[in-house]
Each structure stands twice: as C-alpha cells, then as structure tokens.
Amino acid sequence: MAFPKHVRLFEMGARDGLQNESGPVIDTAIKVELINQLSDTGLTHIEAASFVSPKWVPQMGDASAVMAGITRKQGITYSALTPNVKGLEGAIAAGADEVAVFGAASEAFTQKNINCSIKESLERFAPVIEMAKEHNIRVRGYVSTVMGCPYDGEIDPAQVAAVSRDLLDMGCYEISLGDTIGVGTPLKAKRMLEAVAQQVPVEKLAAHFHDTYGQALSNLYAVVEEGVAVIDASVAGLGGCPYAQGASGNVATEDVLYMLNGLGIETGVDLQKLAQTGHWITAQLGRTSGSKVALALGCN
Ligand code: HMG
Ligand code: MG
C-alpha cells in the first residue's frame, strides 16, 4: 500500500485537549479564541465542543456558548461530541456541522466513560444517528481503547473490528480508532488496523492516537503506510482522557504535520500558524507546549 497523497487533519485541541484540564473551568472566551485561531491555519475539521453532562466533564459545560461565540469560516467543519439524544439536541441548537458518538472496544472503559455496556451504548447511539440523519448532519463514530484499556488491559483487535463495523452499519460515515491511553506500538497498530480494515474500508478509518508512551507518531506512520488518510491530533499535544488516568494528550498536530510534510503528504495546513496557536494556548494555560516541533521552531 502506498502513502496517501493527502491527509485530512482533524483538530482535537479544543475538545479532547481542553476537556481534561484540571483546575478551574477555562474561560469560554479562551476556547473561542483557540478555535478562531485554529480556523486560520488551513485546518478543515475542528472538534469544537462536547455536549456531555457538565457533572461528568465540567470543562465542556459551556459547549453552547463556545459554538455561539466562534467566528465560523467557510469550508470548515465544526463538530461536537454527542453521547445521547440530549447531547444531539444541544449540538443541533448550537449549529454543529457534524457530530460524533463515542463507544469503546472494552466493556470496562465504556462503563466508566459513558455509564453503560457496549450493547447499551449502541442502543443509545441508534436514535442519535437517526435524528442526525433527519437533520442532514453527518455522524462520526469513535472507538476507544483500540490498543489497550486502562481497566481491561489487552484488547482483541477482533473486538475493535466488531464495534467499528457496528457503528459503520448504523450510519457513521467515518470510524476514528482511539488509542485512548497511548499504549500501542507500530506493529500492534498495523495488526489492529488490518483486523478493522477487514470490516470497514480503510478510506472510512481515522487514527486517533494519544501519546502517553511517546509512540503515537510511529504508530501513525505505520497506519498511514497502510492507507489511513485521516488523523486526529491536538495542537500542542493538549489533553488526555478524564476516564483514563495518566493518559496524556493526543499526538501534537504540529508534530504530525511536520512528519507529513517530510513525507510529501499534503494537508493544506500552515505549520508556523499552527505552532503559533499552540504557543498562544499553552501560554494561556501556563505551561510549555507538548509539541517537540513547536519547541524546535522556537515557539514557547
Ligand atoms: P448518565 O448519568 O448515565 O445519564 O450519563 P443519564 O441519562 O442518567 O443523565 C444523568 C444526568 O446527566 C442528568 O442530569 C441528565 O440531564 C444529564 P441530572 O438530572 O442528574 O441533573 N445529561 C446530560 N447533560 C448534558 N448533556 C448531555 C446529557 N446527558 C445526560 N448530553 C452520559 C451518561 C453519557 C451523559 C455521561 O456518562 C457523560 O456525560 N459522560 C461523559 C463522557 C465524556 O465526555 N468522556 C470524554 C469524551 S470521550 C474521549 O475523550 C475519547 C475520545 O477522545 C477517543 C479516544 O481517545 O479514545 C473520543
Ligand atoms: Mg481522545
């Protein structure tokens, strides 16, 4: 399999990144400014908010205000997480261009994250997907813990493939494979992808790798080589998962972009602008960037 000519970067910083910030809830104005700056980098897909219970994830409690505050740029898809119909209603009212349901390949993680079993999660997603379709809103499906679970340990790639297939059959246009706790290694990533690709065409798969063990870039290289052409990443490597203790952020978008540029793969994204945005948001949060590329470029 040859490398794809173009990779679509799906920016996670404003959602996966900020959802995990401990301490006081970040001002809505900062979230809005982050998304506005990201909108000026050439990115076409930005996950902007999460319509989940504010008791569970307080940082995302201002999802409607964030969506209302951003300056939308033509050609950019602003998406939001919607675990149930209540979340979808919020996202529709806020004018989300696209929504996402999120399940997992592990029973224990599903229970901790969304308070139900895998079977129940799929039952909950069905009306979300149906209602989104009625509103002409595309639905993305996440599968978490694809290379390991903080509670169940090893995950059988066949289980990842089965949940992915279910989400596809239910109407998700794309399945994003989450290495939630960043434990994967390249060969494992390839084997997992091979198993899933038997059930879901590779054109419909995205890689969503956290960088806890520093393997995310290598794992991405492994799956991009197999034809994956959509990568989720978070500016400055912001984030983690509130239901996976110790998990660090998504791979930094700047680092992915630098690698893709080196491979001659187009993204349409401006590295300098992205690094500046990463510099700005980490300064707001009072820390240094999690992107080695941004540090090397002298940002931060
Ligand atoms: P539940 O307690 O089972 O649901 O939570 P419920 O229907 O019994 O509702 C309980 C309360 O939540 C009620 O309020 C509802 O109104 C409220 P109360 O009567 O107690 O005041 N509620 C809501 N409020 C706002 N928006 C909603 C909503 N739904 C119910 N949509 C639920 C089920 C899914 C809601 C809950 O478990 C939850 O919000 N979980 C949050 C999970 C989350 O956001 N996790 C992080 C994102 S996933 C992730 O990061 C992984 C990913 O990046 C991929 C990867 O890395 O692997 C995507
Ligand atoms: Mg994630």
Image: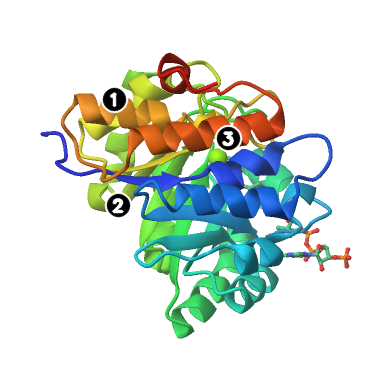
Q: Residue furthest bottom?
A: 134
Say whether residue 288 is left or right of residue 221: right
Where residue 80 appears, as percent x and y from the top left, is 56, 60
Residue type at mark 2?
Val
Say whether residue 106 is left or right of residue 97: right
Is any atom of residue 51 visible in this view?
A: no
Front label number (1 vs 2): 1
Q: Is residue 72 above or below residue 112?
A: below
Q: Residue at x 46, y 17 (%)?
A: 298
* Sequence order check, earlier mark of 1 and 2: 2
Q: Residue at x 55, y 42 (%)?
A: 13
Mark 3: few/some/many CA within 10 Å (<14, 14-19, 20+) = some
Where residue 269 appears, as percent x and y from the top left, is 31, 43
In the foreground, 297 or 249: 297
* Sequence order check, earlier mark of 1 and 3: 1
* Residue at the disc numbered 2: 200
Front label number (2 vs 3): 3
Q: Residue at x 62, y 55 (%)?
A: 32
Q: CA distance from mark 1 to mark 2?
A: 26 Å
Where residue 85 appears, as percent x and y from the top left, is 65, 73
* Sequence order check, earlier mark of 2 and 3: 2
Q: In which quadrant of this rendering is ligand 1 seen?
A: bottom right
The circle on residue 280 is 3
Is any atom of residue 256 visible in this view?
A: yes
Q: Quadrant of the N terminus?
A: top left
Q: CA distance from mark 2 to mark 3?
A: 38 Å
Residue type at mark 1?
Met
The local secondary structure at tag 1 comes to helix
* Residue at the disc numbered 1: 259
- Which of the 4 image quarters holds residue 297? top left
